[in-house]
Amino acid sequence: MSSLLDKILSVFSTGDGKKKHQATRKAKGSSANAADARSKTTSAANSAPSDATATAEPASDAREVAEPTEVAAAIPRAPRVSSATTEEPSELDQYDYELPERLIAQSPTHDRANARMMVVDRASGKIFHRRVADIIEYLRPDDVMVLNDTKVLSARLIGKRKETNARWEGLYLQSDEGGYWEIMSKTRGKLRQGELIELTPPGGGGSRFLEICGRTADKTMIVKPIYNPGEDTLKFLDRIGWTPIPPYIRKGLMVPEDRDDYQTVYAREPGAVAAPTAGLHFTKELLRNIQKFGVDICPVTLHVGAGTFKPITVTKLSEHQMHSEWATISESTVERIRARQARGGRVVAIGTTSVRTLESASNVLPDGSIDSSGLNDATLQPFSGHTNLFIRPPYKFKTVDVMLTNFHLPKSTLVILVRAFGGDELMKRAYAEAIEQEYRFFSYGDAMLIL
């Protein structure tokens, strides 16, 4: 039984139980066509997807899937507040800023650790300009550094609809025990249940196929990849997927170097569709030097999801529904953090994803929910599960003492988190100075160390 197939019921549900049952049966039966589909398809050319326009679709029936949503990786822009909710001033407006396009980094620095690093001292309010390699000067031997060891999947999918030759793009989100995938999808026209998508790999050499099963209430698609014998999701994505770099980097078009550049050197747990970008600055040599200095380095895992690009569309931040992401912090990591805290050491979080993991594990209530205020008696504990923690003022940080982070998109949940941690006025001044000093922004950009 596939758990993801259950999500497509809402597509066909019209209050008529019979229609719902029929649609479910069709969805679950569609994968039976996979073997036939392989024999019916031809080998793909080694070229990019066709620019051909979609042909007219058949009349609507129970097999037709409503037009899909945009691919999540095409959304990370400054969000706009819906005109339907702008009767009152938006709290989001205070997190806006103007950024010259030339400051959006299109590639990382040649030496990761040579990226610029703004150092912001919350105690004195002073700002210094250094390099990431200098971070050891701001650490203490009793500190513990926490890294997010998630590994970015080759989650971007490019191809065409086999029946119409229309261009198609997708973003892998997750899979289940039945081998079904949930993806975000973009194409012209309407996809139909049972339709095949012909995927084009980055290096050419033959295409692969997805079978459309249905659409969810969240406007994502459920699909069935046509695997080769002995193949699984990770092997399929490694073969056919593209690095999901954001569209503000070369309009989302990867180059071969992105496979390494958009991955931390300590990535271990596959599952992210976007990189924990603060970690991109570290080299293996720098990490060794930090450990030699005496700092303990501990892993946590948070699989960065497509929701990280979800715009805020409400006027009050308290009404924003934060996306949910899978996070894990082990008992061993918790014990090592507590040991360093007992010695007077600080918890240094590398990136907002490490911050969210640590703070989520520090705010688990007896009923298993996560308190988004930080105003409770809970303490850091092992945690494994989904977190939708939205850190915003006046959140009380309970575990993180120091944070290394990149410069984030205006009006985003990440810039709100950074302002909550660093102090509103100080962070506004830091961003203004970063622009004045022409720091490089966003995923491949420079870093900020907040003490």
Image: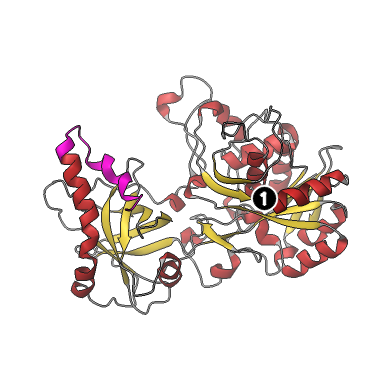
Q: Which residues are magenta?
A: 1-18
In the displayed orientation, state which residue is furthest to the bottom: 205
Reply above or below: 314 against 255: above
Reply above or below: 66 against 117: above
Reply above or below: 431 against 174: above
The residue drawn where x is 48% and y is 49% is: 306
Displayed quadrant of residue 393: top right
Judge from the rendering whether residue 139 lies leftward or rightward of residue 106; answer left or right. right
Residue at image mark 1: 351
Secondary structure, mark 1, is: loop
User: Viewer-proximal residue, 363 or 156?
Assistant: 363
Whether residue 250 appears in this view of the structure is yes
User: Viewer-proximal residue, 50 or 280?
Assistant: 280
Judge from the rendering whether residue 447 lies leftward or rightward of residue 185; answer left or right. right
Q: Position of residue 119 (x, y in %)?
A: 79, 48
User: Viewer-proximal residue, 156 or 56?
Assistant: 156
Judge from the rendering whether residue 225 lies leftward or rightward of residue 260; answer left or right. left
Q: Position of residue 210 (x, y in %)?
A: 30, 63
Q: Position of residue 168 (x, y in %)?
A: 31, 59
Q: Position of residue 325 (x, y in %)?
A: 53, 46
Q: What kind of residue is marked 1?
A: Gly
Displayed quadrant of residue 209: bottom left
Residue 190 located within the stretch drawn in magenta: no
